[in-house]
Image: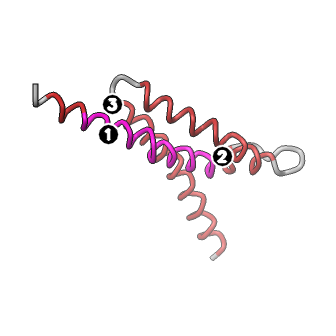
């Protein structure tokens, strides 16, 4: 029985890490990349305003997914994969802008 407690405690910490800072990071990256993949709209501001307004929903969605997914490795893969995908999109845009402006 003593071996079960550290494993449970470790899983709780790992789930807390996934649901807390990593879910926040995934939501922030999705918000930042949203300006790149959303259409501009008639006034040219929709792609800037909409991600900021939807950010709390993104964060809540990633948080709830991380808390409710029964398989912790899959949760890390989904949240981490989405964050890396958005980060790659942001980096590609920054590097393309830097290459075009130089």
User: Callout 2: helix, strand or loop?
Assistant: helix
Check contact, mark 1 vs mark 3: CB within 8 A.
Answer: yes
Check contact, mark 3 vs mark 2: CB within 8 A.
Answer: no
Question: What residue is disc 2 on?
Answer: 34
Q: Residue 51's spot in the image, x, y percent?
A: 69, 45
Q: Which mark is residue 14?
A: 1
User: Callout 1: helix, strand or loop?
Assistant: helix
Of discs 1 and 3, which sits in the foreground?
A: 1
What segment carries the magenta color? Answer: 9-33
User: Callout 3: helix, strand or loop?
Assistant: helix
Image quadrant holding the C terminus, namely: bottom right
Is 10 magenta? The answer is: yes
Q: Residues within 10 Å of mark 2 (few under 14, many from 20)?
A: many
Query: In the figure, residue 90 lies in which quadrant?
Result: bottom right
Q: Which mark is residue 3?
A: none
Is 80 magenta? The answer is: no
Residue at figure coordinates x 50%, y 52% from the top left = 88
Q: Residue 14's spot in the image, x, y percent?
A: 32, 39
Q: Residues within 10 Å of mark 1 (few under 14, many from 20)?
A: some
* Closer to the camera in the image, 71 or 86: 71
Question: What residue is disc 3 on?
Answer: 72
Residue at figure coordinates x 55%, y 51% from the top left = 89
> How far apart are the alpha carbons under marks 1 and 2?
28 Å
Residue at figure coordinates x 75%, y 51% from the top left = 48
> How far apart are the alpha carbons under marks 3 and 2?
27 Å
Of discs 3 and 2, which sits in the foreground?
A: 3
């Amino acid at each position: 029985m003593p071996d079960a407690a550290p494993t449970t405690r470790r899983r709780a910490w790992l789930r807390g890490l996934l649901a807390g800072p990593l879910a926040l990071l995934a939501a922030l990256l999705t918000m930042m990349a949203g300006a790149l993949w959303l259409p501009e709209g008639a006034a040219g501001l929709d792609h800037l305003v909409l991600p900021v307004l939807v950010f709390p929903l993104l964060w809540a969605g990633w948080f709830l997914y991380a808390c409710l997914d029964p398989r912790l490795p899959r949760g890390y893969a989904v949240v981490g994969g989405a964050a890396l995908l958005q980060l790659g999109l942001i980096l590609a845009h920054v590097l393309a802008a830097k290459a075009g402006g130089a």
